[in-house]
Amino acid sequence: MIFAAGMGTRLQPYTNTKPKALVEVGGIPMLEIILKKIIRSGFNEIIVNVYHFADQIIDFLNKHKNFGASITMSDECDALLETGGGLLKASYFFDDGKPFLVHNIDILSNIDLKELYQYHIHNKALATLAVKDRKTSRFFLINNHNELCGWKNHQTGQIILSKDRIEELTPIAFTGIQVINPEIFPLITETGKFSITDTYLRLAKENLIMTYRHDNDFWYDMGRTELLKNAEPYINLI
């Protein structure tokens, strides 16, 4: 699944006339960049959630014949649902019982998606979140086994712990890429518009939510106007 339904407010004025997914980096729309990486990694059945200028995304994919993949749209035009609500709305798509990849539209990285997927299967986790040691204000807190144990906002000092704190926890930043087992859907009690992070923090108390560290990979946030130009040299490296 590609999360592409956001308003892209950090990319204004570009997103005043187009969706974030079609904002170009080095002349190539973000959606094309991410789709090609995912398809090269062996994922060819894909669902994309849409909201802002959804018709433009549909037209773009039709024009390019879905880049040779099978692509389904999850229409959130009636209400923007955030990551948790968007995932839940698309739950019908993941009916084969197999783990699935979820990738944010504005993340550029040379992370090995196949390796992430196999790591998730090996650990038999409910979800596996790609993480990296990078600067941010909000962190996951993980133990020595790379299990999700909590969350911290460094700016406000707020801490949410999912497990009893029996060891020192390491702060680590989520990188917007994850693998999830469809078994998560019956466990989701949240409804409407909500963040999947809130669900993970609740479920981590009794379920295995793993993290996959890829500190040696490059990672770039394409979701801010001032960073777009700087992202261009990395497009061919992913």
Image (cartoon, grey):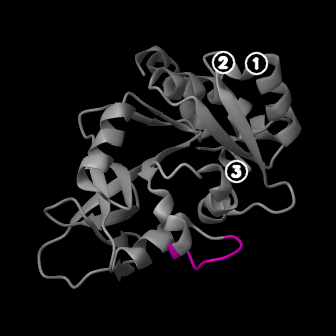
Q: For residue 12, what is the image quadrant?
A: top right
- Residue matched to label 3: 6
Q: Which of the numbered marks, if any, corresponds to residue 68?
A: 2
Q: Quadrant of residue 188?
A: bottom right
Q: Residue 191's image quarter?
A: bottom right
Q: Secondary structure at mark 1?
A: helix
Report the quarter where the N terminus lies. Answer: top right
- Relative side of 56 to 190, left or right: right
Which one is closest to the eye, mark 3 or mark 1?
A: 1
| Residue at (33, 80) in percent of width and height | 205
The magenta stretch is 187-193
Give the Cα separation between the discs numbered 3 and 2.
25 Å
Q: Residue at x 62, y 58 (%)?
A: 87
Residue 97 highlighted magenta (yes or no): no
Q: Is 56 located above or below residue 3 in the figure?
A: above
Query: Which residue type carries mark 1?
Result: Lys
Q: Could you tell whether 81 is left or right of 79 in the image?
A: left
Residue that mark 1 sits on = 65
Are there few (<14), some (14-19), or many (20+) residues within 10 Å of tag 1? Answer: few
Q: Are marks 1 and 2 in contact (CB under 8 Å)?
A: yes
Residue 174 is situated, as x and y percent measured from the top left of the image, at 39, 53
Mark 3 or mark 1: which comes first in sequence? 3
Distance of label 1 from label 2 (alpha carbons): 6 Å
Check disc 2 and give the amino acid type.
Answer: Gly
- The C terminus appears in which quarter of the rendering? top left
Q: Dot 2: what SS? A: helix
Decide: is 73 above or below 200: above
**In this rendering, position of residue 200 left or right of residue 7:** left
